Image (cartoon, helix red, strand yellow):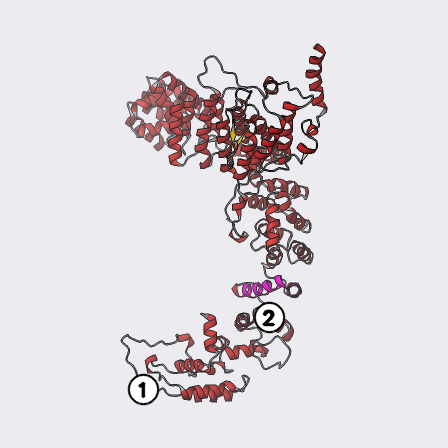
Amino acid sequence: MRPALLRLLKRPSAISVLGTLAATPTGIEQLESRYARLRCQSRCAHQNAPNEDDARNGSTAQDLDTKPQIADDRRSFNFTIYDIEPPEEERTPSSTSLTTGLREKSTPKLLTKSLRFQPERLEFESDIGHNKDIGTRLVDRPENRNDFELWEELLKFRQRRYGDKGTQDIWEGLTVRLDGVRLPVTGEQADFFWQSFMKLGLRRELFLKEVVEYALDLHKHEGESWPQLYESVVGGLLDRGYTKRAIRWNKIFQQSGLASPNDVLQVLRPVIRPSSLVDRAYELHLKNAERPSSLLRTFRLLCRSAEGHQIYGPVMSTLLQHGYGEGAISIHKFLVARNDHPRTRSEIQPLLDYARMYGFADENHTLQAYARGRFGTEAKKAYQGAVGNAPDGTPDGKPFKDDIGARLFATRALNFDMVLGGLKILGVSAIGPRSLRELAVRAHGSQDILEKLKMLRQSGISIGDSLFARLVQKLAAQSRDILLSDLLSSDQHPDVLEDKKTQESLLVSYYTARDSRQYNVSLAVLAELYPDDPDLLDIHFRKHIAAGDLKAAAKIVDEMTLRGQPLTEDSMDFMAEKVLTPRRPAHLPQLSPGKRLNTKREVMFILRVLQRSVPLGGYVSPAFWQELLKRLGMEDYWSELRECCLWLVRQYATRSKDLWPTAPSKAPTGSLQDDRMLKLIFAPEMQTAVVAWGFKDVVNRATASQKVCLHPTTSEPLIPWVRGLLLLGELEQAGLFLHTRVIRDATRTRLAILYGRFCLSRSPRNRTLRRVNPYRWQQVVRDILCAWGDPSFFGGQEETNPTRLMNPYRTPGSRRRSARTVWPRKRQR
């Protein structure tokens, strides 16, 4: 609409019509359709110079102010036409045209508003990018020099008409044509001016230098500057991929005092989430995003120019929120080395949680040791102070031993009123849980207990806030007399009710023994211990697991899935401890005589449970996932292993291709889970194991024709030993990063075991594979290359030096093992 309106305003006839509308308060239907005279007069007025004196402008406006005539043959309209009147504040009693608003006696606000409708006058007044004709423009007048509403109108017009050239013209007028004009630094008007000049400066280095020098002079004389100046310059350059320029300007800002050391935090987000990169810089950023330590190299360089920064907490929060946990671990060492430490434990706690769940073991241990060394003493002192200042569960008053109170309430010779009177005389302010138990035992039902508790409160005696006291009041208020009686007759000490593990253990025991009354008591206690989970689904799941009822446990998991509630880490650890058969490292699990499940059924049950809980936010440690994969691979359950691997990659893969679909500006702003979990699960050792598990299938001459493996894309029949390479290829397509060198070395090791010269394995299965091997090495190598999909997988050694291919370099330890295995057998022969 605006360009079309500007083109219309350029026409003299349009100006005449607008002038007539403004001067004539009558309806639009009274305008005559023929404007020959008006067009002629407006064309003559348009040929006059734009800087004529006010008298000629006034006379021209009076000539244009003609009286409209209503044509007799005007077509009648079949709709209502309303008169449009200007607002009260825009009405000028002494003016009947737009041009009269430009008189000297008009206020600056009316002057600016009337100037908006005169493009020719705007063109003339905004042409100030030179030193010619000084004194002929409105801004040359002293009263208009600091009228920033007028400057804003001129800048907007110049930007619409001439783009960057218009912005530079206004800047020249502000700084060269006029002297002493100080731009505002606060408010929306200041943001408009500075942002307009910054946008041009990011494209033109010399212009940016002029603007920053102006800001330095303003800061020197006025002591203030635009707050977003540093972020606009340094962050804007980083957004566009100009890293070196951003680092240079960062040094200028830090050395000049325009930016404080902590302002470097403002450019962290442009470093990790640039919004408008060019294509080449965008590709480089995607490559660096795969390595957060390289991505944050620019931020480190910026921090080195800002001495004394204290930004540890916000930096860690921002990185972890945007999914750069690995980068947060690497930047932690850098900030600590620059004496930028977390001020409280809450600032480093998210990093500790990330390192515990997704970090490597050495990283986790280092961070935990740092946190203990820095906050261990402080936390201990704070805890001791809190314990010393905390109330002991009784109000201020005379101390009273709980066992004495229990004896008083248990004495049949003393009724409740007598005991209550004695407590008042002694000045007792509270009674303990044992006294409350004896009081409730001697009471006659729930209502009697409530009445006595009410009398205690009226006498100023409290029963405390223990779990036993809360439970007695709750059951009495709900009139659950049977459950209350079972609670009071239980042999558990009131303090034992606070122990969650003990209560869960008792719940399982009562469930196994079918003791429903005590089971209900433990259930009521646990419901009070876990107020956030009134249905106690997690506890019921652990109960069924402990009792060996896996079907009931699976139903609990299904119900939790429908509610969107994941299993807790405690429940997953408990399931792993109770369901999986223990095994020694590098050995298969040994089934005990009374064991009913085998390894396959154990692992698949756990896998089904985790597949329902993990998508809802449940956390499973990488070591546990590796244990499940090892159990399936070691016992050659290949289809289950493949299913589990594919699900893991699809669940945890970041899929960097979909991270920024088309441009970084369309990147999601939420917290993104990085691929650290996949790096931990499918570490190089696990990828080596997948290749080795593919060679576990024993094939002889009788079964060679039956045991084949089909290629997933070409359906070409291959030997079964390449299934590990095929699986790794599928995982790579799903988003897993493969270590090609590690996989190639593992494949050459398998070839050495099958065809090597002095590589007799200590494993009985490997020796059997070598002895009954029905394939020639050429067929095995050909199928390996076909399964991997890259003919250069072995670097051409299968043709140039096959002996070297099947006899790779061996470590001294491998040679010593061969010496103990091979050479004694040869000596025996």
Choose between 107 and 472: the one closer to the eye: 107
Residue 560 spot, x, y in % from top left: 39, 32
Residue 251 spot, x, y in % from top left: 68, 55
Taking the view exactly as shown, the residue that stands out farthest to the left is 78
Is residue 429 among the parts visible in the rendering? no
The stretch drawn in magenta includes residue 287: no
The amino acid pointed to by label 2 is Lys
Residue 551 spot, x, y in % from top left: 38, 24
Secondary element at tag 1: loop
Q: Earlier in the sequence, mark 1 or mark 2?
A: 1
Residue 223 spot, x, y in % from top left: 63, 62
Q: CA distance from mark 1 to mark 2?
A: 48 Å
Is residue 363 among the parts visible in the rendering? yes
Quadrant of the frame with the C terminus: top right
The residue under the point 56% across, 29% down is 722
Compared to residue 224, the image places residue 686 above or below, namely above
Secondary element at tag 2: helix
Q: Residue 165, which numbered label?
A: 2
Choose between 510 and 758: the one closer to the eye: 758
Residue indicated by mark 1: 71
Question: For mark 1, does the 10 Å Cα neighbourhood hold few (<14), some (14 to 19), or many (20 or more) residues?
Answer: few
Q: Which residues are magenta?
A: 189-217
The amino acid pointed to by label 1 is Ala
Choose between 340 and 198: the one closer to the eye: 198
